[in-house]
Amino acid sequence: MENIEWHAIAIRYPLFPLCSASIWIRPRIYELQLGPIVPRQGLGKFMMTTLEKCRSFWNMEKVILTILINNGSARTFFRTIGYTLDHTTADVLERADYEILMFIKVMLDEKVGFIGGGNMAFAIGSGLINRGIIKTSQVLVSGPTLANLQRWRDLGVATITDNNHVVDEMDIIFICVKPHMLNPCAEDLKKNHRAKSKDMNKVFVSVLAGVNLKDLEASFSFIINVKMIRCMPNTPMQISEGCTVYSSGSNIEPHDLEKVHIILNSLGVAQHIPESMINAVTGLSGCGPAFVYTIIEALADGAVKNGVPRQMALQFAAQVVVGAAKTVMITGKHPAILRDEVCSPGGATIAGVHELEKGNLRATLMNAVEMSSQRCADLGRKVFIIVTTHFIMQILNSAEDVYNFITIFEIWFG
């Protein structure tokens, strides 16, 4: 320990009684740094563990820190010990050279409901339960048929067929139906909903691809000043490796945003972004896992063709993707630079890369992301047309009104 070089350790406001009053000022650790001569001796982890004990002792909510984005090794270190992006980190459009991380050990008191219990809902719900963020007794899931919700019951979660019960009893409600089912689902809820004072505290979180906040808030307008968040997660959330973006509606308050951020960020990485970016990011992070699974399968098939056993080929193909992804994240190097580092002149790798170029792999993946993003936007437009048509048909009073509306509709939308 005598070889440890400590730098810039400043503890502001040490713990002491202020005059004779029973007022204590808590210590605030302003900066801690270790010199370059003491890496990989466990001291960084020891220091952060001690800091976490301080947080717990003084009953503080969380630990936050700022780190430079180009400090890949430090970012990896903090993530391995449980630090994740804080909701106060710079917006993606600010192009900041830093990010704000947080460490929080929390179990939410809120009851979490899911309208629709499909794959995305299950990824979120099971992930939260497995991480200990919520208990099974805090979760309620509704679906059209109980038979399709058996895996939820296997977790110990209550399931029902009544969406209204989820809205009435839960505090945070995830809307996980198919986009084209939004209108009939909302209409059924509106027909049976009885306004209560606690409605103003409920937060709705939509995972519907392509459906914007304006349409979501309109569909749930039977709840006064409805609090709505639109998010796009992905299925790796079920193993806490998700990648989620979200945008907040007009009535969302900071404490609402923080609770939802804790939920989404505890299952991977979550980032608040402008709603205008969500469809584009969906094509990457929401649909991207399917593209990567296809790549993993293709890599494995190539190995099998050359005599590698199937199971080994799949394991190694998956590990290749994991290793390459971590290398990009830890080193901060551009993928093209890392690729060049592998490609020796006249070697095997550059020969394979040449085949990828002949097969237009990069262009194909770019087209896949673009097409998925466009499809998300198309889904949103279809929902808008359905909602708008339903509203207009309610105010049409005669056959002539209907005829005139259909004529105008055909002119507008072909």
Image (cartoon, rainbow, N blue to C red):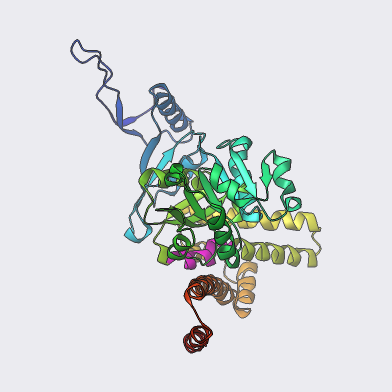
Segment tinted magenta in the rendering: 277-288
Q: From the viewer's perspective, tell me whether residue 327 is left or right of residue 123.
A: left
**Residue sitting at the far top:** 20
Q: Nearer the viewer, residue 62 or 386?
A: 386
- Residue 57: in magenta span: no
Q: From the viewer's perspective, tell me whether residue 15 is left or right of residue 89.
A: left
Tell me if residue 391 comes above or below residue 270 in the rendering.
Answer: below
Q: Residue placed at 62% from the left, 80% from the top?
A: 358
Q: Name the magenta segment's main secondary structure.
A: helix
Q: Nearer the viewer, residue 47 or 337?
A: 47
Tell me if residue 380 comes above or below residue 21 in the rendering.
Answer: below
Q: Nearer the viewer, residue 99 or 88?
A: 88
Find residue 304 and report its image quarter.
Answer: bottom right
In percent of width and height, residue 264 lies at 51, 48
In percent of width and height, residue 171 lies at 50, 43
In percent of width and height, residue 87 lies at 40, 47
Q: Residue placed at 73% from the left, 47% from the top?
A: 151
- Count of numbered tags: 0
Q: Residue placed at 47% from the left, 43% from the top?
A: 262
Tell me if residue 166 comes above or below residue 16 in the rendering.
Answer: below
Q: Nearer the viewer, residue 405 or 325?
A: 405
Q: From the viewer's perspective, tell me whether residue 169 is left or right of residue 55.
A: right
Q: Mark yes or no: residue 208 visible.
A: yes
In percent of width and height, residue 227 lies at 43, 52
